[in-house]
Every structure is written in C-alpha cells, then in structure tokens.
Amino acid sequence: MLIGGFQSTTLLDYPGHLACTVFTQGCNFRCPFCQNGSLVLPEKFETSFSEEDILARIRKRTGIYEGVCVSGGEPTNQPDLAEFLKKIKDMGLLVKLDSNGTRPEVLKQLYEESLIDMIAMDIKAAPAQFAEVCGLTEGTAEKLLAKSSESIEFIMNCGIEYEFRTTLVKGLHDINQTEELAMQISNAKAYFLQSYTDSDLIINKLNGNTQQFESFSEDELNKILVTVRNHVPNAELRGID
C-alpha cells in the first residue's frame, strides 16, 4: 500500500463511528479543484508511511476505534488493498471506503469478501461536464463514466451502507448541471452536497495554473439543494457553516 497520510482520530470521516483515516497515494482523476494534490500527483508525494507502521498504530487503539476510513487519492488503484483491509477486519474493526467508483470490479470483490462495511462514492459531475471536472481527456472520461455508472448501480443495490457526495465548484457546476448529476443517483439513501474550499494544495495551484475557483454562497447552495431533491429527496448540505 502506498500511504501518504494518517489521521489518528476522526468523528467525521466515518459517520456515527469513532475512527481513524488512512490516505492512499495516487489517483486516476486530475480534478483541478482537488484539495489532495499532494496525494494525487506523484511528483508532489511527500511523506510515505509503511503499511506495518500504520497497522501498528491502529492495533494499539483497537479498544478505542470502531472503524477505519480508507481514503485517498483513490484506494481502489492499490493492488494490495484487499490484503490491507483484511488485516483491519481481523482486528474486529469496521471499514469505510472512499472511492471515485471507477473500478467497480474492485468494489464488488471487496464486498464479496466482506472487507467493507460502507462505501462513500464521489459523484463528480453530469456526463457532459465529466471530462472537465475530472481533468480527463474525452476518451478516458467516457470509459470511466461508464465504470462510475456501474459502481452506482452496484452500490445502490448490494445492500451495503453507502453515501454519495459531490463537491460543488462555481464555474464547473451550476443548478441545471447538478440536477442532471442527481438524476444518476435518483432516490439514493444518502447524498451530500459539499462546498469547494480553497487551499494551497489544490491541484491547479500545484501545477502552476492561474485559474481560480470559487465557492457557492449558502443561498446558492440551498437553491441547488432544492433542485437536487427533485431526484434525491434525502439530499443534504454538508460542512456549511
């Protein structure tokens, strides 16, 4: 496992559970607004943690932790992800996996082997904006969008606990596009809209791109939420002060 970060305690990353978060390195997306550029861009990788060290840290607190969130980057790109999760499950802990959904075959394998208890999948954009929002060529975007759709169908029908989420960025998303986006997950049990937050680790900034991104106002987000709820009645805003 390529591990680039570890958060020892979180009450947010695994809703309803006291957990820690493991951040893997590497991703097949290049979302220009991504806040985890140092986990996505190989040339920007900083600290790496050994798998043994991370497992030792988790093992020491098995009496405290209820679960572990594995995020990234994109964890499903890690060839030894299943082996890593098995070691966590052997400690008696729950596992939540954060994913962009582009490797449905991995999600299915992990589910069939009872290695995950919850999946959080990012829904990036409506099909027409998918390439731009994910920083992909049109050809690659078309293939990965199909994979994403396969993951959505699997997640919504396999019976596992799940949530979908979208980070909204002014200039990349708008009300109409977000409604089209929501149609992909119609009647999902849990869907959260999150506001873009600027930082020095945004991929565009790390790449020296001068393009600036903005956040929607709370009023704008609530208007988007009303539209989204036409298709996902349970949709909510998350992380809005």
Image (tube, rainbow, N blue to C red):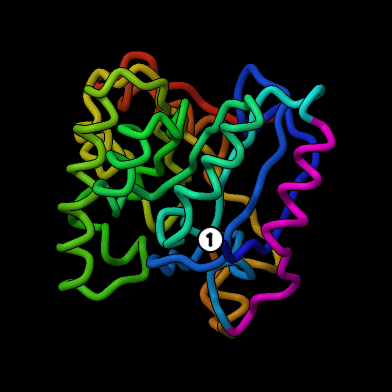
Q: Residue at x 15, y 73 (%)?
A: 139
Residue type at tag 1? Cys
Q: Residue at x 24, y 30 (%)?
A: 185
Please state if 183 lies on the left or on the right of 212 as rendered.
left
Q: Quadrant of the N terminus?
A: bottom right
Q: Quadrant of the C terminus?
A: top right
For label 1, the SS is: loop
Q: Is residue 49 magenta?
A: yes
Examine the image and state in which quarter residue 90 appears. Answer: top right
From the viewer's side, name the closer residue of 82 and 233: 82
Any part of residue 187 in sight: yes
Question: In the rendering, at what x and y percent does residue 186 appear?
Answer: 22, 24
Which residue sits furthest right?
Answer: 60
Please state if 69 lies on the left or on the right of 189 as rendered.
right
Question: In the rendering, at what x and y percent does residue 215 appear?
Answer: 56, 49
From the viewer's side, name the closer residue of 21 and 206: 21
Question: In the rendering, at what x and y percent does residue 65 appear?
Answer: 75, 26
Please tell me whether residue 213 is drawn above or below residue 147 in the rendered image.
below
Please tell me whether residue 124 is drawn above or below residue 159 in the rendered image.
below
Q: Which residues are magenta?
A: 43-61
Q: Which residue is label 1 attached to? A: 34
Please tell me whether residue 13 is drawn above or below residue 104 in the rendered image.
above
